[in-house]
Every structure is written in structure tokens, then in C-alpha cells.
Amino acid sequence: MLDEGYIKYQSRWSKAPAPDPGAARLLEKWREPLYAAGLVGHYNELGIGFGNISMRCRDPGQFLITGTQTGHIASTTEQHYSLVTGYDIEHNEISCSGPVQASSEAMTHAAIYELDPSIAAIVHVHSKALWDEHLNSLPTTSPDVAYGTPEMAKEFRRLYTDSTFGMQGIAVMGGHEEGLIGIGESLEQAAAKILALTD
Ligand SMILES: [Zn+2]
């Protein structure tokens, strides 16, 4: 059904203690209502998790993101987050550090942070209902572009330039069924963009 969950980039993972417990707590604070709304979770029939959340952290270009396959976890701790310390979109490589490897969608997050230094947080959720409702009415990435690829990174750049994505802070992933992205100048703002759709 879904093209989801497995890491498509080259991952250079340094196993290390939790990089920033304070930031992880803030991420969990905003992940909680998303999880409660079923926007972050787990496809039981497929055995894979969905949804991820990140915020800029430490040095410019670095961000803390939920680890791969953490969607099923009701309450995350700092043990479930990974610091992306570097990336190369062209060569499809991510370097990360922490107790777990970064989410399979870390490359998409990296590409979006690169669009604008004012983007401080990114929320990626899954919802069939919201995806069906907002496909092509909210800014939407091309259906030909799959998640977690360098092409998706380029597609977000196009969308940021050519649509109201930057202004509205929300996008539908046309080539990633059920996927939506919220961005904001704070984690609260990014999460609120997504949660507002469920009202
Ligand atoms: Zn996804």
C-alpha cells in the first residue's frame, strides 16, 4: 500500500548518548497531540510506523528528529531522537548521532530547512482523510516524486518558490500517499498548522 518507513538515503550513524534531552522533551510535548489525533502512529497491518517531527538544534544546519520506526511509541523520551549533523542531498547521504538512527524522512526535513533559516521546526504526519481533502487545494508536491529521495528535496524547493507553501506553512505530499508537512518558526506553530486541519 504505502511506500513508507525504510531508509532510502545512505546513513552514517554514530551511536551516541541522547544529544539534547531538553529539545527532545519539547518535541515530545508537540508530538503528543499529533499521536493522540492518529497523525503519528503505526500501520498495524504493515508493521511500520509513520509520522516524524524535528526542530533545529545546536549548530546551523543541524536538527533533532524522531528516530526511524518510532511511530508506534505513545510517549517518546530522549532515547527516541537523533541529531542530524550533516547531509548531502545530491549524494543522498545523512550523518546522524544519537541512540537511534534518524527517521527515514530526515532527507526531506533537511531539504526543507535549507529553504529558509526562519523555518525552525517541521512536522510530517499521515492522514488519509486530510490527504484526500487537501490534495491539490493546499500546495501539493508532484505525484511523480516519492518520499525520501533527492527529487523530493528539489520538489519542496520548487513548491516553496512557486506556491503559497512558505506563507501557509503547510503542504500535501502528492507522491507520498497520506503524507502532509507543516513548517513553522517554532515547533508550536508547525504543529498547530497541522492540528488546525483536524478541527
Ligand atoms: Zn511519511
Image (cartoon, grey):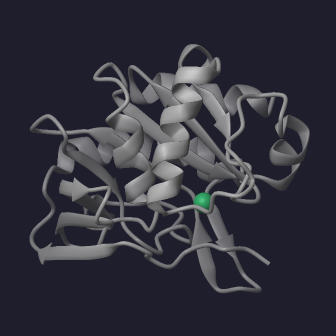
Q: Quadrant of the N terminus?
A: bottom right
Quarter containing ligand 1?
A: bottom right
Front residue of 44/157: it is 157
Q: Please report the residue visible at 44 percent of the width from the left and 58 percent of the height from the top.
A: 150
Q: How many marks?
A: 0
Q: Is residue 130 left or right of residue 96?
A: right
Q: Give the x, y percent position of residue 78.
A: 26, 59
Q: Give the x, y percent position of residue 172.
A: 70, 41
Residue 195 vs 45, above or below: the answer is: above
Q: Give the x, y percent position of residue 4.
A: 61, 72
Q: Please report the residue visible at 54 percent of the width from the left and 33 percent of the height from the top.
A: 158
Q: Is residue 191 visible?
A: no
Q: Is residue 156 visible?
A: yes
Q: Please report the residue visible at 9 percent of the width from the left and 38 percent of the height from the top.
A: 59
Q: Is residue 111 left or right of residue 192?
A: left
Q: Please report the residue visible at 55 percent of the width from the left and 43 percent of the height from the top.
A: 155
Q: In which image quadrant can residue 94 be found?
A: bottom left
Front residue of 131/64: it is 131
Q: Quadrant of the C terminus?
A: top right
Residue 156 vs 159, above or below: the answer is: below
Front residue of 171/129: it is 171
Q: Give the x, y percent position of residue 109.
A: 41, 47
User: Given the current orientation, which residue lies at the most extreme top position?
Assistant: 167
Q: Is residue 130 left or right of residue 147?
A: right
